[in-house]
Image (cartoon, coloured by chain):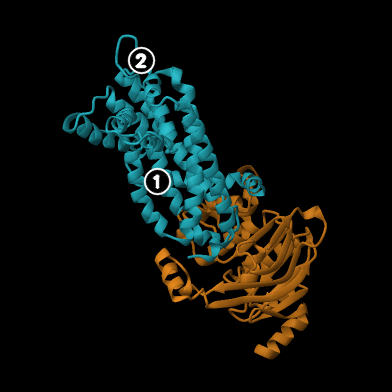
Chain colours: A orange, B cyan
């Protein structure tokens, strides 16, 4: 179950209560009526289920920054997608207060045939911003991305680093109340990453709540005072970033 | 209700989607928007060939009446086919970004409406060129017909777009259904002939009612009423008078059509709202 309301409606920015997510495994997915009929005849109901997230709870106050670490397939991205309202939790409850802006993967929401400039406006629209509001922000976004002339070229000509630059530039300039970042800094070069971290500091100072999923432990400790360690869908540890990353390294390093 | 409020907040995205749909449709085509009338014109030529020369029907102004009904029909069938695959083809986006899912079927409706209105402009020019005296008296009924058709269509688009994400079979079935539907609707076979045929062949009375209960029948009859029945010095007699003789309770069918269309819209909306949260988990 989801709930979403305005930022000033009182209460924490993000509330995650006993949230679990089970997926039906793709090869058992019902695609056609024939498939459904055969399944009914065989007397089987979508048996193969996979628990991606199991019974996770936490609360984030406005302006708080949370890091999420864990091995591949530990449920980090699924958890983030649920906060972003892409998947509904199977059980439990998620409440967000304020405008949520998710950067869940490289090039999400971009149309590769359009120019970088058009994509900035498209991305803004996907975050619920109008053309006029985006026109106001455009110069800052263009400057931050450092893409220069490339902004007028179709995005299919971009390198993956350039795509991630553009996505990040838009996300940190649309004034979200809650910003969700999934491994988006990994592709940028050193210079751009340093710039992103600095910009994230500014954004957080402005009261934005940030959730960052990353495998770069240094990045997590630098940016987030608090970290959750996910393992096989469960939040095994939740505390100060230094402690959690240390334990994580001891167990997995 | 919150779905609708949220969709309004994302209206910039809706405009973006509609523009993209229109751009994609005529990408790499030399004649571009001209196809919005060339297609119905070509289809009209086929039907005119059949129903005037091979198997003549005694209907004055057959070709113009056909065109007046064909354009809204193509809007209906095209939007329905586009709508069915609209959400399924956007699942990759739904997996990555949150936005009100309702925007997708809304964009399908929007781009097809723009396309339809462009076709109407060309149709108006064609009617003027042929020197057809349009029966403006019936214009209010035409507007009512357009509203009924759009309501019904949007309900169907909501329903099929949501269900198609789970059962792609619907998309393949739709092609045949639309084809059958075309033959049963007052498009190429004039309604006065169809209804007269039902009467003269001694079919039970409910056959006539069934013909009229097709939610597309009342709107299409309204559009046809724009064209006079006889070409005479006085511009011909009113088509609706003729239809009134064949269907004594003609106005009742407009109310029934409104009721059916609204019910379909509400059902479509409720089904869409119920299924939308799991779209991203498919495909």
Disc 1 or 2, which lies upstream in sequence? 1
Of B118 and A56, the residue lying toward us: A56
Task: Give the secondary structure at mark 2.
Answer: loop
Chain under disc 1: B
Asked whether the viewer can see residue A112, the reply is no
Chain under disc 2: B
Quadrant of the rendering where the N terminus of chain A is positioned: bottom right
Specify the quadrant of the image occupied by residue A253: bottom right
Instruction: Report the side of A203 relative to B231 (left or right).
Output: right
Could you classify mark 2 by the number of other residues whose Cα lies within 10 Å: few (under 14), some (14-19), or many (20 or more)? some
Task: Give the secondary structure at mark 1.
Answer: helix
- Residue B237: numbered disc: 2
Q: Name the residue under label 1.
A: B25
Residue A239 place in picture, x, y as percent: 78, 78
Of A56 and B31, the residue lying toward us: A56
Circles 1 and 2 on the same chain: yes
């Amino acid at each position: 179950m989801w709930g979403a309301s305005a930022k000033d409606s009182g209460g924490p920015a993000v509330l995650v209560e006993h949230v679990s997510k089970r997926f039906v495994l793709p090869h058992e997915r019902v695609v056609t009526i024939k498939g459904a009929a055969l399944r009914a005849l065989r007397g089987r109901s979508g048996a193969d289920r996979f628990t991606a997230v199991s019974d996770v709870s936490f609360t984030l106050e406005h302006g708080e920054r949370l890091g999420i670490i864990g091995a591949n397939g530990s449920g980090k991205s699924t958890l983030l997608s649920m906060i972003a309202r892409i998947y509904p939790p199977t059980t439990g409850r998620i409440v967000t207060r304020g405008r949520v802006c998710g950067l869940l993967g490289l090039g999400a929401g971009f149309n590769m045939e359009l120019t970088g400039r058009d994509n900035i406006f498209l991305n803004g629209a996907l975050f619920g911003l109008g053309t006029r509001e985006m026109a106001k922000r455009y110069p800052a976004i263009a400057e931050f991305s450092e893409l220069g002339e490339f902004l007028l070229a179709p995005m299919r000509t971009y390198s993956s680093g350039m795509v991630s630059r553009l996505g990040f530039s838009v996300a940190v300039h649309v004034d979200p109340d809650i910003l969700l970042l999934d491994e988006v800094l990994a592709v940028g070069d050193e210079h751009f990453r340093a710039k992103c971290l600095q910009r994230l500091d500014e954004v957080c100072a402005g009261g934005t709540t940030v959730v960052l999923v990353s495998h770069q432990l240094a990045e997590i400790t630098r940016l987030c005072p608090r970290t959750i360690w996910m393992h096989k869908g469960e939040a095994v540890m939740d505390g100060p970033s230094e402690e959690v990353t240390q334990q994580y390294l001891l167990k997995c390093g | 209700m919150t779905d609708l409020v949220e969709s309004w907040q994302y209206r910039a995205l809706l405009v973006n989607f509609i523009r993209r749909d229109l751009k994609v449709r005529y990408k790499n085509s030399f004649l571009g928007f001209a196809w919005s009338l060339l297609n119905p014109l070509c289809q009209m030529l086929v039907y005119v060939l059949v129903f005037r020369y091979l198997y003549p029907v005694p209907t004055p102004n057959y070709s113009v009446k056909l065109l007046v009904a064909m354009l809204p029909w193509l809007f209906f069938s095209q939007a329905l086919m586009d709508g069915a695959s609209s959400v399924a083809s956007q699942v990759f986006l739904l997996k990555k970004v949150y936005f009100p899912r309702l925007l997708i079927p809304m964009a399908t409706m929007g781009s097809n409406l723009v396309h339809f209105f462009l076709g109407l402009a060309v149709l108006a020019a064609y009617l003027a060129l042929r020197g057809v005296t349009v029966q403006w008296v019936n214009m209010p009924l035409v507007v009512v017909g357009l509203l009924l058709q759009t309501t019904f269509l949007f309900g169907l688009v909501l329903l099929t777009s949501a269900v198609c994400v789970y059962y792609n079979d619907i998309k393949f079935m739709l092609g045949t259904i639309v084809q059958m539907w075309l033959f049963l609707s007052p498009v190429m076979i004039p309604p006065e002939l169809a209804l007269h045929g039902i009467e003269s062949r001694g079919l039970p009375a409910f056959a006539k009612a069934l013909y009229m209960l097709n939610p597309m029948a009342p709107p299409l009859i309204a559009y046809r009423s724009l064209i006079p029945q006889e070409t005479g010095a006085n511009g011909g007699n009113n088509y609706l008078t003729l239809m009134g003789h064949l269907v004594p309770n003609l106005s009742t069918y407009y109310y029934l059509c409104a009721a059916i269309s609204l019910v379909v819209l509400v059902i479509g909306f409720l089904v869409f709202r119920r299924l939308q949260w799991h779209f991203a988990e498919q495909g």
